[in-house]
Amino acid sequence: MDSDRPLRVCVVSPLYHTSLGGVGRQALALTEKLESLGVKVFVIARKMKGTPECVLSSRVSVHRAWALRPHVHILEEMSLSNLMISLSFCFSTALILFRKKKEYDLVHFHGASLPLITNILPLKLYGKKVVAKVASANQGTEAGSLRHKYSLFGQMLIRTLKKVDCFVATSKEIKKGLLNDGYIQDRIIGIPNFVDQGVFHPSDKELRDQAHKDFGFSGETIVTFTGRLVKGKGIGVLLAAWGKVVVDFKNVCLLILGEGPFESRLKEQCQGLGIEKNVKFLGLVNNVRKYLAMSDIFVFPSFQEGFPNSVLEAMACGLPVIATRIGGIVDVIKDEENGLLVEPGNANQLADALKRLICDAEYASALGRNALKTIRKNYDINVIANEYIDLYTGLMKY
């Protein structure tokens, strides 16, 4: 690579939107930060409909690749329909990568799944470097969880993915999975997810009070969850726990931000528990921080995660976090120090933790302060973006 030429990176992220989960927000924030630091970036993302308006930086060129069923935003469930959507995006991505192959030196995939698997061989034929950020653990859909999932086919996928120049493991659990799949240590680097503290930061009392007023609240304790409404997020367990909380505390409200195939089922569960007046489903929102600003507690009851961005964002806003003891969560939250950890699927533990923080505002505030210190020390976007630049630069030397 010409030493006088800036790094030229193509980012492939099917989700590239502030309201479509942490993966999309991470990709968007990172590309804009990289561009501001002198990296020439363009993005390939899935063309979607029915999402809130997303304001993008004019510096970053975004190519929206065609895919089947653009109104479907979430593809976590294993189905033929979702497979066809993914494959159509892969095909469109391949065409863009071919057409623009003289405009990039390195491709950074957000997710080590089908778009990477279907494009790694042509990219190596083009002489491009490939970085793959692994976003999830033990789900059988990405590198690091394929060995025991698909038998001989899984072994074929692993061999294909060994052509990746570097995997980014966002948690210790993900790194362990990559090593178990047989990828060599030298091609795995640990870089955690990050928070843009220019966006996610604590709110002063005046702003919080105004947010409460805007949404019609008057003194309620606000507990918030953000994420996709899918089975693995544990929202059914959260509602079961919330039913126990509402028995003891009437002046509370649970905000659920996100969309997904389980939404109607979750609303039915609320009605069955008689808690629908204490739960608000707000759907996709463009400005997550606005809702965190008026929250008192953040809860994340997931069964399986890589390194959840929602948790980092809440901690950056100075909120006390209750989360499950899984995946990358245990890398960032130390129980009783900067948050509370509960076992996944345990509604009683979750209810007890919620009641504890609702009862003890001073303790909740202390956890929130410690959470903010953790973010400022280890997860700032400026530090992480420079780690990626160092990674790209190192790969381009060989």
Image: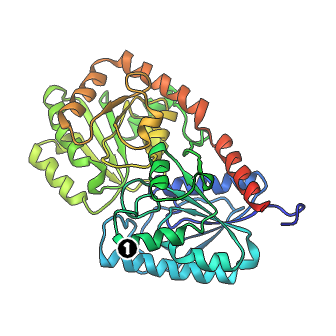
Label 1 environment density (alpha carbons within 10 Å; few <14, some 14–19, many ≥20): few
Q: Is residue 69 visible?
A: no
Residue furthest right in the image: 4
Across and down, in percent, residue 120 comes to 58, 74
Q: Residue at x 27, y 47 (%)?
A: 234
In the figure, is residue 2 to the left or right of 393? right
> What amino acid type is highlighted by mark number 1?
Leu
| Above or below: residue 296 compared with residue 112 | above
Viewer-side residue, 140 vs 47:
140
Residue nearest the viewer, comparing 92 with 169: 169
The residue under the point 35% across, 74% down is 82
Residue positioned 13% across, 30% down in the render: 247
Residue at point 43%, 32% (across, down):
333
Residue highlighted by disc 1? 152
Q: Quadrant of residue 49?
A: bottom left
x then y, percent, for residue 197: 60, 38
Picture quarter with the C terminus: bottom right
